[in-house]
């Protein structure tokens, strides 16, 4: 189809410009304008104009114009929470209780996950995310015990031409009384070291499309000093500040036992609940804490599939939205999902909330698409740059083939996009005005070599972590090889 590589202007000067016209264009702008036959005009890395084709006049001959008939153009999808390095860990943790997941599943694997293996995991995850419409993704990565794991992930992001917010997760808590929250010594670091490493990553990788941010991994696994140091660093370097928080009933109860209140209240008490803050999960909240999040203008990533995978509870999405909280949706890592399917996430977010509230009238497909675009942008505190198709914003958008079986009949197209989700209906993906996925194929990530490398990489991780026998023990079937 239609996908075109923007050319230099005829004079060879000025930014590249191109127009896609005759598509259904859903802008997600503040007035929610949608054009049945619209155009998107891209100049350089930004959106120059969006509108109805009848308003398309005075187009200089140097601007490449292509028809995108049969496509719906949406803002690029924003995955508000993930762990790209975990791309190769798909399927390992099925049915493992969250109470032993860190001790038995995650800590041993992290010891094995170096920059090279992390990069392969990130490439696999990015391939899935981007070919199905994600232009911006969050990735939270451990900086201990392997200092270079974030480097591998950031290299993959650069290779993939993705927009990303990467947090470096740190832990320093030494409370070993609780096995579900205990942190092995090799993973702990002091505040000065954590600050130094975030600053190193920022210096090396920050770019117009990549943001590096600090993250303290939870109020129970970090000391107050570490949480404050990471939040201060975010303010000083102008980045967001990330937290995994209120993500299980266990954490909720232990937080009340230790502090006398919930973990959001503790974060507020430490001065780290602010317009810089992006919270992952935020399931176990009381009404006051929801109000605190709204008042602080902090963002929340709601991760319905990962939360259900570990039976962690259904977040109070309806109440968060009702309070005016900035909410986006996230798939979380392949170690807690296992897919990276944002379309499934949109559908589950709606269905689980209908169950939680006992109200089939909750939400809409339009709401799910808004959460996955402008909602995510607001949660990441990036709404001035991404999340909607508005002149001056970054040209991050996706083209979907509306002739797919699952999207018929056309009269209910928006509902079909979410409730009959078909991730590969996404054909073309643009990041900062550049065609990154063309007709379903990623231009910078080679699928065959990444899939082959992922298999080899997981083999190494399973051997080094001792999880190979665990995986084998899980099947009750009689697997046979070479027998009559
Ligand atoms: Zn996570």
Image: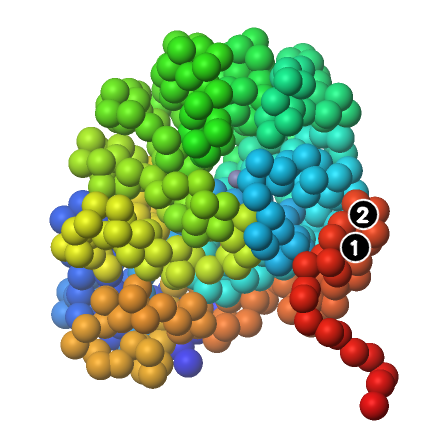
Asked if the residue at label 2 sits under 8 Å from ligand 1, the reply is no
Which quarter of the figure has residue 15?
bottom left
Q: Position of residue 473 (x, y in %)?
A: 73, 58
Q: Is residue 403 above or below residue 29?
A: below
Q: Are marks 2 and 1 in contact (CB under 8 Å)?
A: yes
* Residue at position x 35%, y 43% in the image: 314
Nearer to the camera, 484 or 231 = 484
Q: Residue furthest bottom?
A: 484
Asked whether residue 212 is in view, the answer is no
Within 10 Å of disc 1 (Cα), the crowding (few <14, some 14-19, many 20+) is: few
Task: Say which quadrant the N terminus sits in.
Answer: bottom left
* Residue at position x 42%, y 20% in the image: 263
Tag 2 residue: 466
Nearer to the camera, 176 or 149 = 176
* Residue at position x 34%, y 40% in the image: 315
In screen coordinates, is 46 left or right of 116? left
Q: Is residue 78 above or below residue 424?
A: above
Asked if the residue at label 1 sits under 8 Å from ligand 1, the reply is no
Tag 1 residue: 469
Q: Position of residue 377 (x, y in %)?
A: 36, 42
Q: Position of residue 274 (x, y in %)?
A: 37, 20
* Residue at position x 83%, y 90% in the image: 484
Q: Position of residue 103 (x, y in %)?
A: 68, 35
In screen coordinates, is 100 left or right of 379? right
In screen coordinates, is 423 left or right of 333? left
Nearer to the camera, 388 or 126 = 126
In screen coordinates, is 118 left or right of 410? right
The secondary element bearing badge 1 is classed as: helix
């Amino acid at each position: 189809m239609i996908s075109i590589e923007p050319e230099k202007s005829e004079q060879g000067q000025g930014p590249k410009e191109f127009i896609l016209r005759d598509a259904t264009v859903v802008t997600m702008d503040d007035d929610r304008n949608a054009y049945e036959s619209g155009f998107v005009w891209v100049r350089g890395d930004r959106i120059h104009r969006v509108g109805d084709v009848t308003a398309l006049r005075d187009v200089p001959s140097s601007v490449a114009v292509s028809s995108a008939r049969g496509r719906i153009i949406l803002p690029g999808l924003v995955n508000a929470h993930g762990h790209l390095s975990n791309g190769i860990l798909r399927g390992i943790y099925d049915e493992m209780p969250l109470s032993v997941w860190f001790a038995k599943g995650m800590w041993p694997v992290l010891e094995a996950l170096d920059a090279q293996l992390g990069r392969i995991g990130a490439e696999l995850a990015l391939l899935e995310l981007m070919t199905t419409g994600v232009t911006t993704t969050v990735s939270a990565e451990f900086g201990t015990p392997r200092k270079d794991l974030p480097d591998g992930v950031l290299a993959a992001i650069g290779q993939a031409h993705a927009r990303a917010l990467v947090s470096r997760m740190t832990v320093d808590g030494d409370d070993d009384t609780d096995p579900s929250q205990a942190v092995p010594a090799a993973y702990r670091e002091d505040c000065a070291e954590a600050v130094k490493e975030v600053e190193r990553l920022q210096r090396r990788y920050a770019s117009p499309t990549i943001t590096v941010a600090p993250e303290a991994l939870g109020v129970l696994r970090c000391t107050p000093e570490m949480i404050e140091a990471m939040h201060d660093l975010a303010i000083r370097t102008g980045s967001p500040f990330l937290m995994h928080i209120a993500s299980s009933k266990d954490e909720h109860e232990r937080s009340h036992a230790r502090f006398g209140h919930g973990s959001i209240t503790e974060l507020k008490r430490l001065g780290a609940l602010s317009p810089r803050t992006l919270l992952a999960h935020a399931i176990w909240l009381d009404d006051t804490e929801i109000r605190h999040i709204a008042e602080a203008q902090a963002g929340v990533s709601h991760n319905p599939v990962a939360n259900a995978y570990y039976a962690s509870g259904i977040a109070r999405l309806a109440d968060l939205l009702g309070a005016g909280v900035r909410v986006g949706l996230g798939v979380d890592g392949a170690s807690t999902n296992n897919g990276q399917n944002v379309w499934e996430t949109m559908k589950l977010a709606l269905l689980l909330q209908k169950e939680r509230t006992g109200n089939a009238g909750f939400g809409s497909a339009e709401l799910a698409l808004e959460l996955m675009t402008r909602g995510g942008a607001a949660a990441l505190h990036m709404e001035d740059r991404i999340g909607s198709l508005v002149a001056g914003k970054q040209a991050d958008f996706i083209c979907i083939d509306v002739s797919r079986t699952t999207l018929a009949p056309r009269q209910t197209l928006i509902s079909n996009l979410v409730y009959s989700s078909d991730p590969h209906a996404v054909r073309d993906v643009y990041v900062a005005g550049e065609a990154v996925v063309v007709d379903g194929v990623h231009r910078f990530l080679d699928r065959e070599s990444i899939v082959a490398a992922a298999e080899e990489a997981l083999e190494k991780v399973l051997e080094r972590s001792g999880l190979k026998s665990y995986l084998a023990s899980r099947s009750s079937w009689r697997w046979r090889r070479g027998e009559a």
